[in-house]
Amino acid sequence: MQALLCPNRWSLLWDRNCVPTPFFFKIVKFGGFIVSSFWYIASVLLIFDFVVIIIPYESLFRSFPEMIFLTLCSIWIQFVVHFHYHRTRYSCPLPPGDVTDRRCLKCQSFKGKRTSHCGVCNRCIVGLDHHCPWVNNCVGAHNHAHFFMFLVYLFIGMVFHLYFAFNTFTTQLWNTYGETYYCNTYLPHAWLKDWTCRNLNPTLLLMILCGLTCVTPVAMITYISWNVFLISRGHTLISWLKAFRDRAPPRPETITENWREFFALSRCRPLYYVLLWPSSFPRKTFVGSLDSVASYKYSL
């Protein structure tokens, strides 16, 4: 009963009985490669469905200026999503420490403050939040802001595309092979319509896309809310778990200070520029003794 009430006892039980083996980490690494490949498959499916099916069919229900506006918004959202995804996946981690710091017992690298070891990548990461299989990379101080923006724009993109393709979904998925069916409708701008109807199943493609656009926002809003909570408290997932384990007091930084530092607004970067323009975030350096997000100041 005491183990259920004391966080320190939970930590000891985990270290003693539940530490993953190197083989487990190899499985996670391979699984991350498979899962991250799914991202590119889903992206190709989304682009194909919109170019070949949804945009030509939605032109029957919407005016020309509205179609131009929605198409440009769709292109912009997809560009921003892919920008932050690739910045999250391919950003190089920060140096974990210098010769004055202690060494990591697992990878033998110098381990500074707020540095944790990732068993999947077998390296120390500054400000480690977690290892994300969807990007097949660690999320830490070097790419946490890009990861958060990726989640936000992915949620916005799924909701936007669900609205954009609403008429197509409601017409095609419940009136298959009727008069309004895609293959039976004259669409002058559907330049791959004949090939799609002959070699693929448009209804199946739309069902997959509809499932992705309906399920993804539900998962994203939960994960975004959790990240908002951590960033507002000045924590990553690892530091929050350590603070909960050690029953540490709340961090002294305010919510505004944590968010300004997280988005590098302290460098005279306006908020609208960070939110709307796909720009890279400057690299961070550790300049304090507090175990919080605000302890990592952006280097000039």
Image (cartoon, helix red, strand yellow):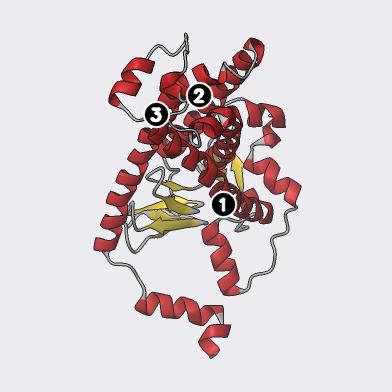
x, y percentage for residue 178?
46, 28
Count all numbered tags in the image, as a single digit: 3
Q: Left or right: where does residue 217 sit relative to residue 44?
A: right
Looking at the rendered image, the disc whose residue lies closer to the viewer, 1 or 2, is 2
Numbered disc 3: secondary structure = helix
- Quarter occupied by the C terminus: top right
Q: Which residue is mark 2?
A: 180
Residue 67 location, quadrant: top right
Furthest residue to the left?
A: 23
Numbered disc 2: secondary structure = loop
- What residue is rendered at 44% in x and 30% in y? 46
- What residue is rendered at 32% in x and 57% in y? 107
Query: Around disc 1, counting alpha carbons within 10 Å, would you say few (fewer than 14), some (14 to 19), or many (20 or more)?
Result: some
Q: Which residue is mark 3?
A: 202
- Name the amino acid, label 2: Thr
- Name the amino acid, label 3: Pro
- Name the amino acid, label 1: Tyr
Residue 242 location, quadrant: bottom right
Q: Which residue is mark 1?
A: 223
